Image: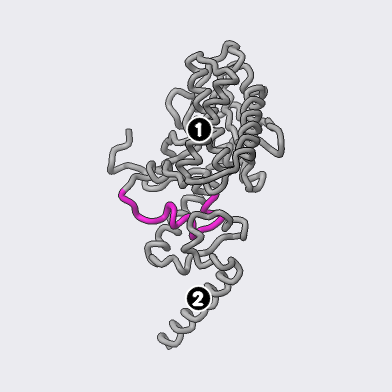
Amino acid sequence: MVNAMNKPSHHWSQTSSRLMNACPRAWALTYGRPSPHSKSRTVSRQHQPRTFDELLTRTMRATWRRKIEDLYQRKIWSEAYTERMFTHMVNDALSAAKMEAPLLYRQQKIKQSLKQIQVLEQSTGLRPLVDGQPRRWAYFDRLDSTEVDGIEFYAAPDLAVYHQHRWTLIRIQFRSPRTGLMSQQLEHLLTVLWALRSEGLPDHISAFRLKVIQWKGSRWQEHTLNITPPLMEQALGLMKHDVQEMTWLSRWAMADPSLSTLPLAVHNKHCRGCHHRKQCPAVGGLAQAKLRQQLELNQSEATKSLNTA
């Protein structure tokens, strides 16, 4: 265990990385300010879902997680029990988020979500486990961290299945992320780095396979990623670059508590449903906010020039 003096001062997670690259200001508000809480608590703290679809996605993952925990104990859920549990969790989540959805629409979406979970369990990567075929396997929490070069690192797989003398690390995406294909691949490869640094798993890449099961459109797609030393180096470089940018943004946010000079969102789509939108300079429009910010920066630089002349 890492003692308090040697505790990592930075963390990396896909959620933090994607938010920083989408909107540095939103990242600074979420992660970049001093807090009495540990980084682990910062990572684990979730905002309420912004949309009904986001609520459904979270609930699907939570339901699937419970099913996997019970499956590990050889407790099998019936279709009726799965439907009852999922419906109960959706209603609880709606109540907690103070969100409403018309009954017929809610029932339709619950039915679609249940079908998505059912089809997931018939995927090539998961069907042997559901069917009870002999396998050595383990499940993990996405909030399980390890330390990599002084960085608290969150990239756990959802499952690890031992078969034919190797561990297959499986990551499941209930919604496709809006990031480039190469960035996604490097993020997934960081799962291997997490496994290499974790107790109970091998310490060489030849012991692993990497499989991603992703919901795309209206079906699950499965693909296996190559694991090579050069790709692993690129993935590690991506993480270190992100942490360097995060450190810089944290210092910037502390130097400018108003956050008025921090870069705004890259695109309008990142503003939709943002939890910080009401207090953001871009609440009336991103393009206009960026223009105002640039004008203020130019005026500030002009003033400094006059003072030093």
Residue at 61% of width from left, 22% of height from top? 126
- Disc 1 packing (10 Å; few <14; some 14–19; many ≥20): some
Classify 115 as above or below 41. above
Segment colored magenta: 18-36
Quarter in which the N terminus is drawn: top left
Q: Which residue is mark 2?
A: 297
Q: Residue at the top extreme?
A: 134
Classify 129 as above or below 92. above
Q: Nearer the viewer, residue 147 or 47?
A: 47
- Disc 2 packing (10 Å; few <14; some 14–19; many ≥20): some
Q: Nearer the viewer, residue 237 or 43?
A: 43
Tell me if residue 231 is in the magenta stretch.
no
How far apart are the alpha carbons under marks 2 and 1? 48 Å
Residue at 54% of width from left, 45% of height from top? 100
Q: Can you tell which mark lies on residue 89?
A: 1
Task: Tell me residue 258's x, y (percent).
Answer: 41, 67
Kind of residue at badge 1? Met
Kind of residue at badge 2? Leu
User: Where is residue 116, by image quadrant?
Assistant: top right
